[in-house]
Amino acid sequence: MRILIVSCVFPPEPVISSQTSAQVAHALADGGHDITVITAFPSRPAGKLYQGHPRRLFQRSQESGFALIRCFTFLSPESWLVSRFLENIAFGVTSGLATLSVRRPDVIYANTWPIFAAGILSLVSRLRHIPMVISIQDVYPESLVTQKRIQADSWLARFIRRIDRWIVKGCQSVIAISESFARIYRNDREVIPERLYIVPNWSDSKSVTPDDDRGTEFRNTRGIPQDAFVVLYGGNIGVAAGVETVIEAIRYLRDMTNLYLVIAGEGSSLSICQALAREIDSRRILFHAPWLKEETSPVLSAANVLILPTRGGQSLVSVPSKLVSYMLAARPVIALALPGSDLSKLVKEQSRCGWVVEPDKPEQLADKIKTVAMMSPNDLILYGQAGRDFALENFTGDVCLPRIVHILETIAARA
């Protein structure tokens, strides 16, 4: 079988959706299939081109088991709507041209930027009569509405929704990463249930492991006392993340002299967060950037509690993939999410790995941090272990990857 994977992010980029696309490619190649991957030149999470990668229209290479075509796109170091649109549309054009140039595959697996890049790929797949399977990582325009970038009743929101409906109706299968995503695509986008699957993002079970010794070493290198209570955020520092709320919470915790906040990662809001931290308490708010992939376990293990913020209604239309890494690190989680959201249910009800506070309310978050800091170490260990156990049972490649492979092989066989 000949299978084409179009992914907007791909290793060496550290984001989980990048790693899952790579695992799909390797699993299919190991199964004896002819695999080609079309992706962008790596620039995540800082929006800067990785060293050693050229600025050209296309670059073709051979990876272990599959062909790799990297395509030009605009870089987006700032989370501006215009720059993200240019990045999206540019990759849509170049990946569409690359898709036209390759030998006709039996199926396309699309894990690409929504609406514009996905729309161009959908058009190419229809022109070439190639069945397409799309993975939904973000729901648009709903995500833009919750970030208050566009109005829910605007012509732009209606236009984006119509494009999204047109894309998914032309797909053989739609893979949603959560039940709330699936509900939107059943009810609003009118995808028939037989073509809709729920497969969450996952991580390699060995990619993050609890490592107290290296966590202690990380504390030493950053000058954090071993008896300090460390609250840590690790991930993209962008508009939707709402990291500013976490920093603001420190205003209400000045009496906790042993409290440290560590923010690991990069993103478009990094400079804003650094300025806010200097204003509040630069001694106890530390930034770790760049955050290398091999540092994931020691950095997360340095925390007493991991914090997962979202902004506004973002938790209703997304499930941050960093939650998987948090759970595998066996540390309790405080999530900022709305009641009824998938994120809230995962943390509080299904895995029972932590607590939930409403977004954008730093004073409430401060109260929760203070309460958690007073808990016994053994209780915190139990919360953390519950999260790791849940992740191993539900969010690893051993569980999720075979389902993706089966969907693609089934559709390719029909073709």
Image: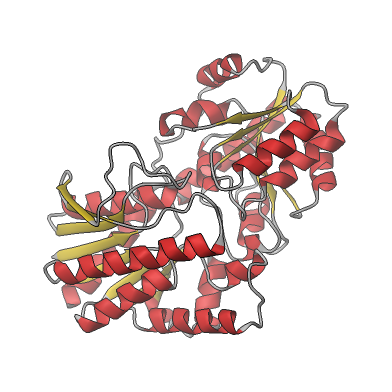
Q: Position of residue 64 (x, y in %)?
A: 16, 43
Q: Is residue 258 left or right of residue 55?
A: right
Above or below, 281 against 411 in this view is: above
Residue visible at 54% across and 51% down in the picture: 78
Residue visible at 16% across and 48% down in the picture: 61
Q: Is residue 152 left or right of residue 168?
A: right
Above or below, 54 against 102 in this view is: above
Q: Position of residue 57 (x, y in %)?
A: 24, 57
Question: Considering the image in quadrants, where does the N terminus appear?
Answer: bottom left
Above or below, 50 against 374 in this view is: below
Above or below, 377 against 346 in this view is: above
Residue visible at 54% across and 28% down in the picture: 299
Q: Quadrant of residue 73?
A: bottom left
Question: Considering the image in quadrants, where does the C terminus appear?
Answer: bottom left
> Can residue 279 be seen?
yes
> Can residue 209 be seen?
no
Q: Position of residue 4 (x, y in %)?
A: 22, 64
Closer to the camera in the image, 12 or 20: 12
Q: Is residue 46 left or right of residue 12?
A: right
